[in-house]
Amino acid sequence: MASIDIAAVRKSYGATPVLRGIDLTIANGEFVVLVGPSGCGKSTLLRLIAGLELIDKGEIRIGGRRVNDLPPKDRDLAMVFQSYALYPHMSVRDNMSYALRLRKTPKEKIAAALKGASAKLGLDALIERKPRALSGGQRQRVAMGRAIVRDPQAFLFDEPLSNLDARLREQMRFEIKKLHRDLGATSVYVTHDQIEAMTMADRIVAMNEGVIQQVGSPSDLYDNPANLFVAGFIGSPAMNFLQARTVAGPGGMSVTVGQAEIAKVPPATPTGPVVLGLRPERITLTAPGQGAQAAVDLVEPTGLGMIVHLDLDGQQLKTFTTERLPLKAGERVGLMVPPGSFCLFAPGTGERLAG
């Protein structure tokens, strides 16, 4: 396995810039997830690492070796695609061993590699089947097995679970993470699904419009987002954003929405307009008369709990609670926000201020 170093990488298609100067180091054995909306440049970056696209500017090193001008076959990487890309006329065994046979790998080494990969992925009973006789999850495991037998320097995953239903995605997330733990393989995983990013990554790279917005552990991005984009993209239900103000009063500095005081803020916080970010699960609902007052708009039961949509001084926000409260539309409730459980952002730039 090897580290991957990306320095000042740029890529454009015609006059349209797709990557605007990417700097990123992926450590040996690390599982890094590139996450962001469609068109943010995450798949392009993966293809540049793989050698499927040419770099306009910058440099990529794999295991310390500069690979800008190396063709894909010489980079010693294995890629798992969104489409399984299996040969329909070949068995599981032949699909998994095809690349090794092309390299004229000795038969005993192929057999050993197949045995190890099929055992890890639970494919022993399916080894002679053709792809048409496999489920979607089984086909994706075969595609992963084809990558594993090559024993590459790093694995590249390009939205590999997008074609699976919700239950299979959950199962495959577990299998990919467990596989990474067992192999200790350097892995770069692309997805637009923030749940996949949060549950699988050692580090998340949040991207938007060809720029890295923030790099950190899942808890870093969730608890300490660098800007409005990261705060809104990471988390489900999504963070609430309210137009607010920081004001100085007899009891110290606070943040208010309309006339309602939401929480105290550090004394050094500048006064003026801010965007207040509130995670739905960190808002505590109270009896009317306690805390800021809001009206119930809608209640969505989820089984685990309920999402309560509120109107707070003309602004919409949602809360999540595991309590099954007997709330009805139009009812008044109070809400409280514990200290340190909110974010403040600059209205113009969207950059994190405090909180």
Image (cartoon, grey):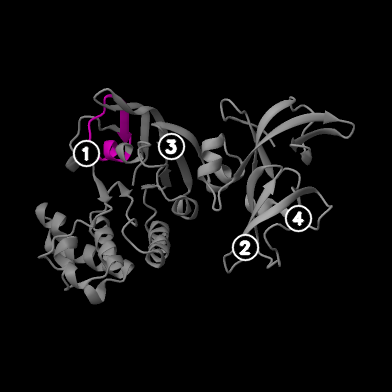
Say whether disc 3 or disc 2 marks the residue closer to the N-terminus: 3
Quadrant containing the C terminus in the rendered view:
top right
Compared to residue 83, the image places residue 42 above or below, namely above
Question: Which mark, residue 332?
Answer: 4
Which residue is nearer to you in this view: 150 or 218? 218
Q: How many numbered marks, from 0 up?
A: 4
Which residue is nearer to you in this view: 267 or 37? 37
Compared to residue 61, the image places residue 134 above or below, namely below
Say whether disc 2 or disc 1 marks the residue closer to the N-terminus: 1
Say which residue label 2 marks: 306
Say which residue label 3 marks: 207
Q: Position of residue 164 (x, y in %)?
A: 33, 62
Whether tag 4 and tag 3 are in contact, CB under 8 A, the answer is no
Query: Whole-Å distance between the Cαs marked 4 and 3?
Result: 39 Å
Front label number (3 vs 2): 2
Q: Is residue 172 visible?
A: yes
Say which residue label 1 marks: 52
Q: What's the amino acid at mark 4?
A: Arg
Front label number (1 vs 3): 3
Q: Which residues are magenta?
A: 46-64
Query: Whole-Å distance between the Cαs marked 2 and 4?
Result: 17 Å
Residue 123 left/right relative to 204: left
**Residue 63 forms part of the magenta stretch:** yes
Which element type, helix, strand or loop, lies under badge 2?
strand
Q: What's the amino acid at mark 2?
A: Met
Residue at 81 percent across and 49 percent down: it is 291
